[in-house]
Amino acid sequence: MQLNSEVITTPPRASATVVLLRDAPQKGLEVFLLRRHTDSAVLGGAYVFPGGKLDKADSDEKVLRHLDRDPSELLRALAETDMKIDMAAGLYVAAIREALEECGVLYARARTSHALAHDEHQRAQWQKQLHEGVKFGDVLASADLQLDTHHLAPWSRWITPRMPSVTSKRFDTRFFVAVLPPNQTPIHDDVEAVDSIWLTPKDGLLRYWNREISMAPPQIMTLVNLLPFKDCASVLQATLARKPSVVMPETFDEDGFRQICYPGDPHHSIQEKTMLGPTRLRFVEGRFEPKDGVEAFLKDRKSTRLNSSHSSVSRMPSSA
């Protein structure tokens, strides 16, 4: 990754990400990662979770009529009181749309069925249509599909700082955790992503540390915060006991290194820690890493009850 020192003054773009989970025999909890094309404008070559920007059409009335829940219920789940209802619903739509577009997984069912749509050929056709420019609303209408938002649980919110460090854009991203539906197999689309892997959170962090894969800080720290969980059920249970953590990184240069710090760090404007793991990473030889080595990622694995009360953008510090 190349270090960027440009300060971005435009507001962050709303986006949604899906952290796909599964229970693997003998391994336990695994997470799905896609490797972005090296020519990608954002994090080229890095391993990321499926996701992308919120499109205006995601909040269109014609799309929202395919939801399985009232938009006001989705707003409550996100725990963001200052958000408009149609935007909250649109973020769920964006997450589901991006999962289909980037890895062929669909959280939707035919209105006449109790099972999630799992016909591989159908899903491949719908994925192809999205790549060809067909609107998601038209895909849903043509197959009379109902989106299944119950499978998506809000996990965290990441707001890119004004000096993004490894991108030239800012995002305000809601991360949803979601268990892989039965009879569905995610695969990279060979358009935006060129490879894909399932890894336990620990294996993902070790492979990152050994320079076998490249990841950005939100992916790294998400894996750190999934370390305490042994299976999908325990992750979903945790989402019921906590609000989504709000992570507003702050960047600065110190001791010859670019530093990125998180709530709870002495240098951060918010002193309450909102997630597990190190509160500071530094940019060393093309990647971000904790000063104390890989053990700083792995040691804080017992507490699963950290919570964030900073759920309003009104608390956003000036350097966010």
Image (spheres, grey):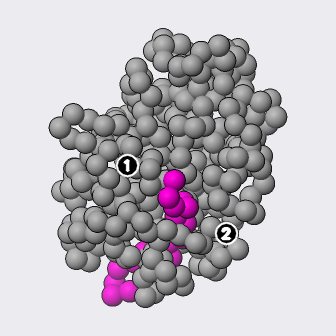
Q: Amino acid at mark 1?
A: Ser
The residue beneath circle 1 is 234
Task: Say few, some or many: other residues with alpha carbon within 10 Å of mark 1 (under 14 / 14 to 19 / 20 or more).
Answer: some
- Residue 297, given in percent of the width and then of the height, sits at 27, 66
The residue beneath circle 2 is 312
Task: Say few, some or many: other residues with alpha carbon within 10 Å of mark 2 (under 14 / 14 to 19 / 20 or more).
Answer: few
Q: Amino acid at mark 2?
A: Ser
228 relative position to 167: left or right: left
Highlighted magenta segment, given as a residue range: 240-260
Q: Residue at x 43, y 37 (%)?
A: 179
Labels 1 & 2 near each other (Cβ < 8 A):
no
Tell me the quarter of the image containing the C terminus.
bottom right
Q: Residue at x 38, y 86 (%)?
A: 254
- Quadrant of the rendered image containing residue 137: top right
Q: Nearer the viewer, residue 103 or 89?
A: 89
Question: 5 above or below 155?
Answer: below
Look at the image and tell me whether residue 252 can be seen.
no
Cα distance between the residues tagged 1 and 2: 27 Å
Question: 66 above or below 168?
Answer: above
The first of marks 1 and 2 along the sequence is 1
Q: Residue at x 57, y 55 (%)?
A: 173
Tell me the quarter of the image containing the N terminus.
bottom left
Is 247 colored magenta in this rendering?
yes
At numbered mark 1, what does the secondary structure look like: helix, strand or loop? helix
Q: Residue at x 57, y 38 (%)?
A: 150
Question: 68 above or below 200?
Answer: above
- Quadrant of the rendered image containing residue 220: bottom left
- Quadrant of the rendered image containing residue 199: top left
